[in-house]
Image (cartoon, grey):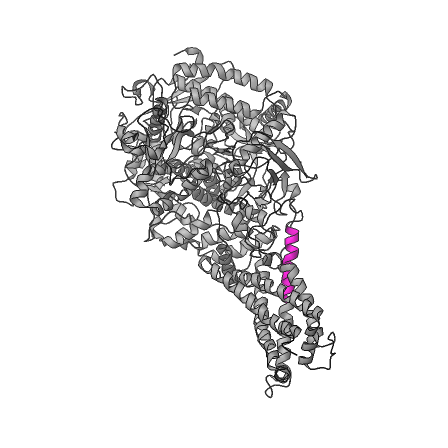
């Protein structure tokens, strides 16, 4: 009997071995896309949060600030060029982040189609457990947020109002503020795990750094979330009118 | 003590499985978990029932054959504060209390097809090793051992990674069914040794590629793997693997088709 | 000697070692004289390797690298599970890195002496020669051996020697060495030179025209029983300690491959030479399924003692120094706690027999680290033995940093095995036997850290050279499933499988195994006498009879059936146990691990009888009812002079 050496033969129960779908992009590469796009979004969020705090400086300063954003780069480049570059980069980052997330989510679902009857998490934090649905909430929120405060179409003041008026009008409504609070808390948790995870994914963590990275992620998530929460809550309680 | 066991019974991958309840009496606290299953099986055989299949061999926590989910935890690691992380065979019944109900399930992952009851096929892990988890040193080619010096720090760290027993608990515990901790332990072990440098880039790229082909999930750095690992392999290895992989991809390494 | 036990056949001898040159040149001379196989012809030759431990894994990888077509078989799910993985302490090599007087000749001398002059000098010398290349090979593979701060390899000392020649990787040396071989093997599987047969158990040997040409094996997942053919068959299936039920072997470790080969004509040498390891965790209950070894390296720093008074049940920490008996240090002042395993085990048994044993059932002695912790500090002890201490704590629930460990001897290794010549070929041409499965290098007692050395020596360096000489006369005539020998073997395995499943009696396989094991430990264990052995030989046939009429093996043949696997193995253990007792009874002397109560010095040491027993006892299988045939291979000691072993 001539043995067949053409291919590596695995003589385990070959009947039940599925032919796996060829993985086109490595799962780690996807994770790197997620980490890098996440970092871009985080950098944007820092600037966004700082800008929001200008609400406390009054309508004129805040409206002036939002007007300045449109004029960055002028006169070297035509009006709104830099703004559009930022918007395109953000859009690409969000799409890439979501694509990688959905792709890995599906991979995880395929990797364990049958769930455990009993399962107990020990290391998993609330933050890490809610990454995916938290991400979905954030995606929906971003759409609403742009309609509300950027385009103004979903804002009580309408689209021809000033940014300051839109913010004050929206956050005076407890329901709208509640939506923002929920979304921002989701953002906080998302950042808490995301920052740690990105550090791991980009290969920058090690045993001595692990504690520092985790502590930083917590502090950063709290500060950023708080920074975002202060203006809407201030409007709601009447500190900003 | 007396216990109620709920055990996953499934005659083959093709048939449907379910949890079946058994009462086990007179369990000694000095028994290992597998010895308790032995006692159950002897009862089942004498009652004319089918004994529970489970993989096991060395029963001293080193061969990596055994492994079941115990109350939702791989090897039961993480259920007991006082008990160090071990393989199932080194979990002793003194960790449980009289009257406890214990759920016992197999590792569940697409990459680990079920064979029978609690036994699964983990050959996917071997194929990850085949993809590059070695140093090419054909017999007879080796230089004198002391011609290669390895700093103690690197040697110790390599050893820590190399203690992985390939049991698959990391996959079983991972919410994504990812084998990243397993793969990273080998990548890091060999990557820390001077002998492992020539193949370092290709190794990591090919092993990760094979891991994806086998149908494992992606790592999201949750950490269930490390706290379920009988050898306590650190999450640090995953970060090191990622570092190596991104460097290798930048250097132009691509998986063998 | 009662003649009905066995008959004496023709003597045998190794004809392959070139004894016309000095011992130090024999291995290179043999390699020179052995025929070679042209690399282009190797592709046409198939070799079956059964087992993937240190010997089998290394051999399959090396033969694959050489260009042979290799078929590798193992019963576990992965080659990495082979029980070599559990070896803790280390691996010897005559590197003399410590400049402490070590040399190839000293390792050779220590091994022959440690084996109580019952090993073949030529094989042992070769083992010592090859030992240094093993370390080089393993380092090149990336095995993370323990190192010093300067980056050099660290060494420690081990029982039975006075030099530091043991290389180690914390307490997991076997694991790391095995993974080196496993990775080399997986590399060859990926390269397509090694065909893999996971979860496939060899159940018979196919012998065609007097040559080993294949095996019958059962796929343990599907239950399919099929034939596999080759030009040569290599057995690397380990030892048979599980005859004793409780041993430090893995639960699946079995003698089936070598026993079935024995029944096909391979002589079985020195079956009674079993090693009882002195430092194991004591038995704690009826349901216990296996014993756990604590590395012998612990005896480097731990001191063995029992209370001077019998029945002293005080907490060990409350017993003052003056009331303790550090009996190994007392009896063997020069080797102290580092005497060879057989001696350490027997002395533990002696003090327990005197009623001075400790622990719940009085079968245990203390291994105390208080002095070492005081001298070196707890961190140093943790670094050296941390994983062993953790393992002890997990199993016993006691903290060995605080309370002395309790240890007791347990069956650990079998020096006996299939008879092989210098080429590691058995008496069936084309059947090679390597590692623990053969009998060759350790005589009547194996020194610590020598099993890993022998397994890797055989697998990496010896077999891949010697097998060429046999294969050079191949490829042999084609054999396939239509060959009568193949049909007969296949049908035999099927018939036995069906028979086991059809008995449907009232006892489980495990209950027979436990009964056999207890009987063997009591009657053919650390101390044997004519009386005990005759009792065992009366009882074993009864156990066999009852097994074949009253065992209950559930399930089906055509499915994953672990009960069926176990039953087949126990059936073979019962037959092997009988041969072990015959061998032990016929060898009316004490040597190494074989201690006959009738043959001891006035102070209770093993007393050899070189006049009458300086030979290898190689047994030929005979059908039930016919006594086995003894073939003697006389042992000659040209280089190490026969002397009473003394470790005082």
Q: Nearest the camera: C36 or C374?
A: C374
Q: Nearest the camera: B236 or C537?
A: B236
Q: Nearest the camera: C362 or C150?
A: C362
Task: Determine if the magenta segment contains residue A184.
Answer: no
Q: Main secondary structure of the magenta part?
A: helix
Indicate whether B156 appears above or below C599. below
Q: Is residue C10 shown left or right of residue A197?
A: left
Report if residue C264 is visible in the image: no
Q: Find residue C34 and report its horizontal and vertical position in percent.
A: 40, 36
Q: Residue at x 35, y 38 (%)?
A: C297
Q: Find residue B241 and report its horizontal and vertical position in percent.
A: 50, 57
> In which quarter of the view is residue C173 placed?
top left
Report if residue B63 is visible in the image: yes
Q: Find residue C385 and report its horizontal and vertical position in percent.
A: 38, 42
Question: Which segment did they paint magenta?
Answer: A95-111
Task: Determine if the magenta segment contains residue A96.
Answer: yes
Q: Nearest the camera: C25 or A222?
A: A222
Indicate whether C408 appears above or below B192. above
Q: Is residue A238 shown left or right of residue C159?
A: right
Q: Find residue C160 and report its horizontal and vertical position in percent.
A: 31, 33
Indicate whether C199 appears above or below C287. below
* Quadrant including the N terminus of chain C: top left
* Quadrant including the C terminus of chain C: top left
Residue closest to the far bottom: A75
Residue closest to the far front: A238
> In which quarter of the view is residue C200 placed?
top right
């Amino acid at each position: 009997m001539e043995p067949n050496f053409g291919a590596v033969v695995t003589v385990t129960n070959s009947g039940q071995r599925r032919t796996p779908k060829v993985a086109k992009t490595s799962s780690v590469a996807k994770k790197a896309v997620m980490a890098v796009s996440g970092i871009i979004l985080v950098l944007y969020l820092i600037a966004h949060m700082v800008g929001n705090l200008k609400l406390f400086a009054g309508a004129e300063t805040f409206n002036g600030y939002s007007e300045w954003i449109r004029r960055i780069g002028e006169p070297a480049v035509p009006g709104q060029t830099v703004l559009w570059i930022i918007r395109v980069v953000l859009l690409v980052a969000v799409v890439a982040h979501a694509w990688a997330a959905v792709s890995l989510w599906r991979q995880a679902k395929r990797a364990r189609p049958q769930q455990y009857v009993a399962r107990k998490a020990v290391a998993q934090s609330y933050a890490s457990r809610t990454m995916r649905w938290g991400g979905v909430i954030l995606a929906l929120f971003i759409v609403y947020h742009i309609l509300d405060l950027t385009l103004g179409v979903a804002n009580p003041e309408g689209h021809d109002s000033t940014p300051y008026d839109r913010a004050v009008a929206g956050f005076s409504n407890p329901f709208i503020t509640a939506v923002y609070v929920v979304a921002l808390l989701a953002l906080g948790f998302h950042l808490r795990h995301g920052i740690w995870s990105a550090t791991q994914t980009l290969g920058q963590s090690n045993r001595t750094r692990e504690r520092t990275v985790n502590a930083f992620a917590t502090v950063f998530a709290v500060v950023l979330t708080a920074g975002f929460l202060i203006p809407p809550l201030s409007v709601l309680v009447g500190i900003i009118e | 003590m007396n216990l109620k066991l709920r055990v996953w019974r499934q005659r083959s991958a093709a048939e449907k499985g379910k949890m079946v309840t058994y009462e086990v009496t007179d369990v000694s606290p000095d028994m290992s978990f597998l010895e308790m299953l032995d006692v159950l099986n002897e009862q089942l055989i004498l009652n004319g029932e089918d004994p529970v299949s489970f993989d096991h061999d060395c029963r001293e926590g080193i061969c990596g054959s055994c492994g079941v989910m115990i109350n939702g935890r791989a090897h039961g690691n993480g259920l007991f504060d006082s008990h160090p992380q071990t393989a199932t065979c080194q979990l002793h019944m003194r960790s449980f209390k009289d009257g406890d109900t214990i759920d016992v399930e197999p590792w569940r992952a697409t990459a680990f097809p079920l064979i029978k009851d609690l036994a699964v096929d983990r050959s996917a892990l071997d194929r990850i090793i085949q993809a590059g988890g070695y140093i090419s040193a054909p017999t007879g080619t080796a230089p004198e051992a002391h011609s290669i010096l390895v700093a103690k720090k690197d040697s110790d760290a390599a050893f820590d990674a190399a203690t992985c027993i390939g049991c698959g608990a990391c996959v079983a515990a991972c919410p994504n069914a990812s084998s990243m901790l397993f793969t990273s332990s080998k990548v890091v072990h060999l990557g820390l040794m001077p002998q492992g440098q020539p193949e370092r880039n290709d190794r990591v790229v090919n092993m990760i590629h094979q891991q994806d082909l086998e149908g494992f999930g992606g790592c999201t750095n949750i950490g269930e793997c490390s706290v379920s690992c009988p050898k306590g392999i650190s999450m640090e290895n995953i970060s090191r693997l990622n570092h190596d992989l991104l460097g290798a991809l930048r250097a132009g390494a691509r998986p063998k088709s | 000697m009662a003649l009905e036990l066995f008959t004496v056949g023709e003597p045998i001898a190794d004809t392959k070692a070139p004894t016309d040159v000095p011992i130090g040149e024999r291995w290179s001379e043999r390699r020179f004289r052995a025929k070679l196989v042209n690399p282009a012809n190797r592709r046409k030759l198939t070799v079956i390797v059964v087992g993937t431990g240190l010997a089998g894994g290394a051999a399959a990888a090396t033969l694959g690298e050489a260009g042979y077509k290799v078929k590798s078989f193992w019963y576990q799910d992965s080659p990495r599970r082979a029980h070599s993985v559990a070896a803790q302490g280390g691996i010897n090599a005559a590197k003399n890195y410590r400049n402490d007087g070590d040399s190839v000749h000293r390792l050779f001398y220590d091994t022959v002496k440690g084996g109580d002059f019952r090993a073949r000098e030529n094989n042992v010398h070769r083992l010592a020669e090859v030992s240094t290349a093993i370390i080089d090979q393993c380092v090149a593979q990336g095995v993370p051996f323990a190192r010093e701060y300067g980056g050099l390899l660290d060494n420690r000392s081990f029982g039975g020697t006075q030099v530091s020649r043991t290389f180690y990787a914390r307490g997991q040396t076997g694991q790391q060495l095995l993974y080196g071989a496993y990775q080399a093997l997986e590399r060859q599987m990926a390269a397509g030179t090694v065909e893999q047969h996971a979860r496939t158990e060899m159940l018979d040997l196919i012998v065609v025209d007097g040559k080993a040409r294949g095996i019958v094996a059962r796929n343990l997942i599907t239950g399919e029983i099929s034939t596999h053919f080759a030009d040569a068959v290599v057995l690397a299936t380990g030892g048979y300690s599980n005859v004793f039920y409780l041993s430090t072997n893995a639960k699946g470790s079995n003698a089936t491959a070598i026993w079935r080969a024995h029944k096909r004509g391979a002589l079985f040498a020195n079956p009674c030479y079993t090693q009882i390891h002195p430092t194991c965790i004591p038995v704690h209950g009826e349901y216990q399924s296996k014993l756990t070894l604590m590395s012998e390296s612990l005896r480097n720093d731990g001191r063995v003692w029992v209370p001077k008074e019998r029945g002293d049940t005080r907490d060990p920490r409350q017993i003052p120094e003056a009331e303790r008996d550090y009996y190994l240090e007392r009896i063997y002042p020069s080797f102290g706690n580092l005497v060879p395993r057989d001696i350490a085990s027997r002395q533990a048994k002696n003090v327990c027999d005197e009623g001075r044993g400790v622990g719940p059932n009085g079968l245990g002695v203390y291994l105390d680290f208080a002095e070492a912790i005081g001298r070196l500090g707890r961190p140093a002890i943790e670094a050296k033995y941390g994983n062993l201490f953790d393992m002890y704590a997990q199993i016993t629930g006691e903290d060995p940093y605080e309370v002395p460990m309790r240890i007791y001897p347990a069956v650990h290794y079998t020096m006996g095995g299939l008879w092989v010549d210098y080429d590691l070929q058995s008496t069936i041409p084309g059947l090679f036997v390597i590692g623990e499965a053969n009998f060759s290098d350790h005589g009547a007692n194996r020194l610590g850290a020598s099993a890993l050395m022998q397994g890797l020596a055989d697998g990496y360096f010896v077999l891949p050279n010697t097998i060429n000489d046999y294969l050079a006369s191949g490829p042999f005539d084609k054999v396939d499933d239509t060959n009568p020998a193949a049909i007969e073997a296949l049908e035999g395995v099927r018939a036995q499988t069906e028979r086991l499943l059809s008995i449907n009696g009232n006892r489980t396989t495990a209950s027979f195994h436990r009964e056999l094991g207890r009987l063997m430990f009591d009657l053919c264990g650390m101390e044997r006498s004519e009386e005990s052995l005759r009792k065992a030989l009366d009882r074993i046939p009864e156990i066999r009879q009852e097994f074949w009429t009253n065992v209950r093996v559930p399930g089906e043949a055509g499915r994953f059936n672990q009960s069926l696997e176990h039953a087949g193995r126990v059936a073979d253990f019962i037959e092997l146990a009988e041969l072990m007792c015959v061998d032990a009874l016929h060898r009316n002397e004490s040597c190494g691990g074989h201690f006959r109560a009738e043959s001891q010095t006035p102070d209770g040491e093993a007393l050899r009888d070189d006049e009458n027993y300086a030979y290898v006892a190689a047994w030929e299988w005979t059908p039930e009812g016919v006594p086995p045939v003894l073939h003697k291979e006389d042992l000659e000691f040209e280089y190490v002079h026969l002397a009473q072993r003394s470790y005082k």
